[in-house]
Amino acid sequence: MKTQIAKLAPLALLFGSLLVVGAGCETKGPAEKAGEKIDRGVENAKDAIDPRGPGEKAGAAVDKAVNP
């Protein structure tokens, strides 16, 4: 009996973790979209006051490409 449970436990953990990850992938609501617009506006204002260097610009481009 214990060997069956020992064999099924990793499989159950795998499926359980996949369910948790899948539940986190929801569409963005209007409040989240508005918050992102505000964040972009703040970033643009900061860049106008203190311009970013080439490394920061490259990092921001990578972040934007990875997290559209």
Image: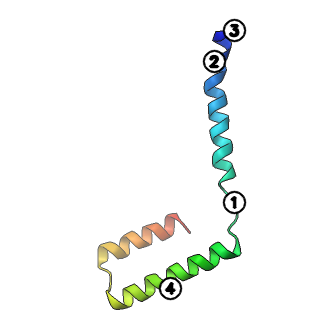
Residue for badge 3: 1
Number of other residues with Cα within 10 Å of mark 3, as a class: few under 14, some 14 to 19, many 20 or more: few
Q: Please, what is the three-letter code of the amino acid marked with disc 3?
A: Met
Residue matched to label 4: 41
Q: Residue at x 62, y 16 (%)?
A: 6
What element does badge 3 sit on? loop
Label 1: element kind: loop
Image quadrant where residue 34 sits: bottom right
Mark nearer the N terminus (1 vs 3): 3
Q: Earlier in the sequence, mark 2 or mark 4?
A: 2
Q: Amino acid at mark 1?
A: Glu
Secondary structure under badge 4? helix
Q: Disc 2 marks which amino acid?
A: Lys
Callouts 4 and 3 close, C-beta under 8 Å: no
Picture disc at residue 26: 1
Position in image of residue 60 (x %, y %): 41, 72
Residue 55 circle label: none
Give residue 19's quadrant in the image: top right
